[in-house]
Amino acid sequence: MRGIGGVKNFWGSRPVGTSILITLLAAWPMIGADAPERSVEQIAEASRKAVVMISSSGRGGEKRGAGSGFIVRPDGWIVTNLHVVGEWRPFVVTLADGTVVKPTAILGVDRDKDLILFQIDGKDLPTLELGDSEAVRPGQVVLAVGNPLGFGLSVTRGVIAEQRDMEGTRLIQVAMPIEPGSSGSPLIDLEGKAVGVIAMKSGVSTALALSINQLKPLIEKPHPQPMSRWLTVGTSRLWRPIMGGNWRQKTGRIVASGIGDGFGGRMVYLSETLPPEGAFEVGVEVRLQDESGAAGLAFHSDGNNRHYGFYPTGGNLRMTRFEGPDVFSWTILETVSSDYYRPGEWNAIKVRVAGHKLTGFVNDEIVIEAEDSGLTSGKIGLVKFRTPEAQFRKFRVAQSLPPVKVPEETALEVIRVAAELANGGKLRPETVETLASFGENGLRALRDHVASLKRQAVREEDLVNQVHEHMVRRELVKVLSAPEEEVDLLRSALLLSRLDNPDVEVEPYLQLIERMAREVRENMDGSTKKMNVLVSYLFEDLGFRGSQGTEYYDRSNSYINEVLDDREGIPITLSVVFMEVARRVGLKVVGLGIPQHFIVEYSPRSGDRQLIDVYNGGKFITREQAQKLSQTPLDDEALRPSSGREIILRMLRNLGGVAALEQDAQGVLRYLDTTLALRGDSGHDRFMRARVRIELGLLEEAASDLDWLIEHPDSGVDRATVEYLRELLRSHRRGQ
């Protein structure tokens, strides 16, 4: 069984969490006969308003996963799976209208049933009425509204298969395509009532839901506890958070994540240590996850909205006086650009407060000198704005703080030793002793030098990767630009493998397929049932098989070289291997990219069209059986042969989906770049790329994608959404 959405379900599987990249609406055709009083569309639209998306964090504060939940009382009671939020971990809720809120209390937990009930601040919120799960029957049509793959709320249709008890838990088995991220989604009958809570995926097109009657005791007898008691990981009694946000301490660092309640996502973390009387200095080392964020020091705080801030923002340094909750009560004293600030690295920032004179330092260099008397006393601490995470270390306050800059003679000695080692010199004990004699300064100088070398290596490695990807992409475009009958599908698929793995050699695998085809021809020995010989050779002699369980979503299943090495894959890659061998032995086959699956069509000389399910051992199947695999009625268009280009594009989408599951935004971007190199007019893929680029902080590149979409209004992407995102980017640039 494959768990959905969170890090751990009550069967112990551990799928990977997801990152929210795009919004997708997926609706499958109706299966069933009698039409309900309300249309499925009406039920889905009404239900979506009560469904929420949930994003959770791991023990280390990392993004752990995305799941779903639904509101059961208008004052903000929400149910989901316990594995979606995780025990004692922070999580946030996104309502259907896009509002992001935080839970205020945990109302009840049933660990055996994997259920949790919690509350958010709310009034007159849309709710889902609870049905009677014991009344559901096999064959009954149901809907699920959730957050598959972290892509946003979507609607899926399915059919009740049966109810069963498993380890004391009542489960509803549903024939329904479910993706990771759907955990906690409501299972809704055609009266619009919730009859279950999606808990996991079992098989290719089967979901298991917890029956809704198991939730009712939590609602009838809640046991509230405030979030302050629930969130025990990384909390500290030496600091006090205000304005929300998520602050935690981990291995000597303070990590700030999420969005605060203040304007611009402002969130403040006040130290219980008071500054000295009179003049003083307060400092910290800060590193931004993304330079589009902002985070630094707060001082002269009244414990509420009033304080000064000194912080890096957009690659600059800024000193601001905050006197209220909104931007109209803020006064930017000065914003400067400085070569002493190192984007993406740890930077030591410090403020010297002497009466009305405020001096800001970065890495021991003065960057701002301001005179201001708006605030004269208060607490000290940290402040963060916007979405990107920030980390802090070495928070200090004193009348005078020692410099962090390494003395010149120490730095020169470190550089001399490093140069000697780089030229083949040996590391001698006396050299270590000499550097150690410099104390912390020597160690800091060594770290600075190593960091400099790493920065250079990263830049050069990035250049290598970009050149490699460009070369592979160019060759792939060339191969797929040939007339369809001349397209080399196997070479194209191997180039996809090479896109991620530069060590993949194409020619040996081309030779391997030729050898396999030669062995099939030898086994045919004049047989008239050539297709049976091929099926027996691949699936009995060589043991090719469909990947199962949690390994189904492994990227290896989309790399043809690894499919050939391991003889294991998913429907599309196994079909590519099958078709390439079949064509070389004179069998007429094509691939059919039906929804949710991929099959092969064989046209023997008799003229009859035969369908083959390569994923399930090369079985001959009927059109009706293919329809069951697809969970979708198949018309002639759905059974149209896929071109080589279409097959490669579908493989790219598969790789992108797995990369999203693994929270590999760079990987998603790499596959989208390749997709658009092959199909530059795809508005959907271009919009996806814009969203991913925004997430990675590539704002100018994202703006160019949005501009293209605005210039091509027939691209199929909602123009209002594109223009909204484009204006957000313009506002961000103005804010810098």
Image: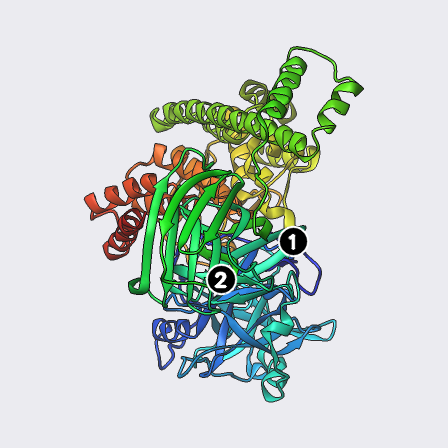
Quarter residue 118 falls in: bottom right
Q: Which residue is labeled 2 in the image?
A: 268
- Residue at 56 percent across and 59 percent down: it is 275
Side (left or right) of 229 relative to 661:
right
Along the line of sight, which residue is nearer the eye, 76 or 303?
303
Q: Which residue is labeled 1 in the image?
A: 250
Mark 1 vs mark 2: give the one in front.
Answer: 2
For the question of whether residue 527 can be seen, the reply is no
Q: Of the numbered discs in the image, which one, if any, rests on residue 23?
A: none
Residue type at mark 1 is Lys
Residue 221 placement (x, y as % from top left): 63, 88
Q: Is residue 176 positioned above or below 122 on the image?
A: above
Side (left or right) of 101 relative to 439:
left
Q: How crowded is mark 1: few (under 14 residues within 10 Å), some or many (20 or more)?
A: some
For the N terminus, the image quarter is: bottom right
Residue 707 placement (x, y as % from top left): 24, 43
Side (left or right) of 568 relative to 594:
right
Furthest residue toward right: 429
Residue 697 placement (x, y as % from top left): 40, 43
Quarter residue 475 falls in: top left
Residue 350 placement (x, y as % from top left): 50, 47
**Which is nearer the N-term, disc 1 or disc 2?**
1
Residue type at mark 2 is Val
Q: Tag 1, which secondary structure?
A: strand
- Residue at 36 percent across and 62 percent down: it is 374
Q: Is residue 556 positioned above or below 407 on the image?
A: below
